[in-house]
Amino acid sequence: MSTAELHTLTGAYALHALPESERQAFERHLEDCEACTQEVVELSATAARLGLAVAETPPRELRERVLQEITTVRQETPAPGRRERTGGGGRTGRWYAFGLAASIAAAASFGGVAAWQNQVAQDARQEANQAQRQNEQLAQVLSAPDAKTASSELTGGAHGAVVVSQSQNRAVFLASGMERPPGGKVYQLWFNDDGTMRPAGLMDPKASDDTVLLDGPVDRASGMGITVEPAGGSAEPTSSPVALMDFPTS
C-alpha cells in the first residue's frame, strides 16, 4: 500500500473499521506521519463527542425483566457423562438459568449498542467527509489563479478579509479578533446582490478567529455583510449589519 493511500485511512482507523493487515500497516505509518496522527486524534475525539451526545442510560425495567426471566428459563439437560460441579441438584440449574437470562438480556443490550455504534460510525464518517469536502473547496478558492482579496477593519477592533475566485464562483471569509455574539445569537454572513442580502452561512459563535466558505455561489454579488441573528440563522437580516465589505474587483 502506497503512502498516498495510507493518508486516506485516518477516518477508518479512528472508527476501528480497518482489516487487520491494513491496521498494522497504518499504525507503522503513524510512527512517521505527524499529520495523520493529529487527524486520527481529532477524528477520534469527534466520534467520542457524537457518542456522548446520543448515549442513553439503560432503563431500570431491564434489570427487573432479567430477574423475572431467571425463574422462568428452563434448565439445560446435562449432556451424557457431564459432571456436575456442585453437589446440590438445583444449584447448578439456578446459576445456569441466571447466566442464560443474563446472556439473553446482554445480547439484547449489545444489539442496541451495536446499532448505536454503527450509527455513530456513520455520523462520524459523514462529518469527516463533509469536513474534507469543505477543506478541499476552501483550498480551491484560496489557491485559484484568479483569487483576489479585500480586507477591512470590523467593529471592536476585529479584522476581516474576503477572498473571491470567479473561476470557482465561490468566496471565503476570514475573521480574526471577533467579539463573541450575545447568548443565543450568531454572526450570519450574507451575499450583497445589489442591495438584496442573500444568506451565505454562519460563523462559529465560540470562535473569535474563523474561516468560512460562504454558502452558495458568488454569482453577481458585489459584496458581503455580517449581522447578528438568532441561533440557527435567519432567512433575511433581522438587525443592522455589523460589517459590510465590497468584493475585490478585477
Image (cartoon, rainbow, N blue to C red):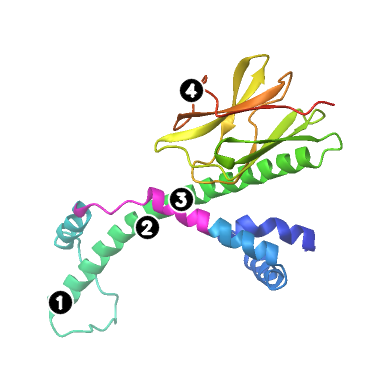
Relative to 50, 131 lies left or right: right
* Vertical position of residue 61 compared to residue 210: above or below: below
Q: Which residue position holds label 1?
A: 91
Bounds of the magenta segment? 45-60
Majority secondary structure in the magenta region: helix
Q: Residues within 10 Å of mark 3 (few under 14, many from 20)?
A: some
Q: CA distance from mark 2 to mark 3?
A: 18 Å
Q: Which residue position holds label 2?
A: 110
Q: Is residue 205 magenta?
A: no
Instruction: Check residue 50 in the rendering and tell me which mark sits there, or answer none.
Output: 3
Instruction: Check residue 239 in the rendering and tell me which mark sits there, or answer none.
Output: 4
Disc on the earlier residue, 3 or 4: 3
The local secondary structure at tag 2 comes to helix
Disc on the earlier residue, 1 or 3: 3
**Tag 1: amino acid:** Arg
Q: Position of residue 101 (x, y in %)?
A: 24, 62
